[in-house]
Image: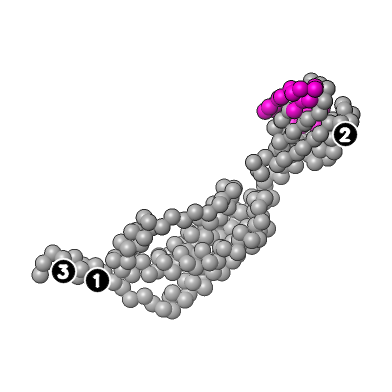
Amino acid sequence: MNQLETFENFLTSGTVQISLPYLVFSLISAAILSFILAKLYVKYGTAISNRSRFARNFVLLSTTTTLIITIVKSSLALSLGLVGALSIVRFRSAIKEPEELAFLFLCIAIGLGFGAGQVATTFVAFIVISLFIWGRHFTHKKEDHQNLYLSVSGKNLSLKKIVEVLKKNSLSVHLKRFDKLQDGLIEASFLIDLKSFTHLEKMREDLNAISKSINISYLDKLDI
């Protein structure tokens, strides 16, 4: 027996038959927990993006991870094949907020737990994490202020008066750009931390009081 045959026998001898009833139980359990996690994310999440649409992927991600781990752990050859496959396949997803990535890792963890046969550990860990998510909703102080990019333009404007109006209605004001063009045209860009949305209208009224021809543009910082 040569070395190649010895290596092939080593790979095939490590194959374990998968229990179909346990596989069905693992897939159903992973689907249930990820479905509950999706409901928690939609209700208690803080991401600004469409949470309900993003949460639709949780069940599919958890069950797919469960299936992959269950199959891979039954054979050493499949484990090595998975490593090779992951080295050439790149998974890319547009993640705008860290919270989205955290919940995706939770879905993968659920699939890993059931796929590896750690049923009790997965259930206990899920309950603890769910309680943490639920408790965070009541202990986290919601902030009413918001970061905005503000652009102001117009003729014969006073930068000093504009800054005074912004400081009166904002927690912080940072000048990002200031251009003085021909014919007395002025363009200025600010990053402001708005106190509340009620101050947004008051700020607009105060800026219009400086000049009726002033142009004001607001843009959420997250859109940049």
- Residue 33 sits in quarter: bottom right
Q: Nearer the viewer, residue 125 or 14?
A: 14
Q: CB atoms at circles 3 and 1 under 8 Å apart?
A: no
Q: CB atoms at circles 3 and 2 under 8 Å apart?
A: no
Q: Quick check: is 172 in the magenta stretch?
A: yes
Read off the residue under disc 1. 12
Of label 3 and label 2, which has the lower sequence position? 3
Of label 3 and label 1, which has the lower sequence position? 3
User: How dense is the environment of label 1, judged by Cα within 10 Å: few (below 14), some, or many (20 and up)?
Assistant: few
Q: Secondary structure at mark 1?
A: helix
Q: Secondary structure at mark 3?
A: helix
What is the three-letter code of the residue carrying label 1? Thr
What is the three-letter code of the residue carrying label 3? Glu
Q: Is residue 145 above or below residue 104?
A: above
Read off the residue under disc 2. 205
- Quadrant holding the N terminus: bottom left
User: How dense is the environment of label 3, judged by Cα within 10 Å: few (below 14), some, or many (20 and up)?
Assistant: few
Residue 202: x, y in percent? 86, 35
Distance of mark 3 from mark 1, alpha carbons? Answer: 11 Å
Residue 26 seen by the camera: yes
Q: Magenta region: which residues?
A: 163-187
Read off the residue under disc 3. 5
Mark whose residue sits in front, 3 or 1: 3
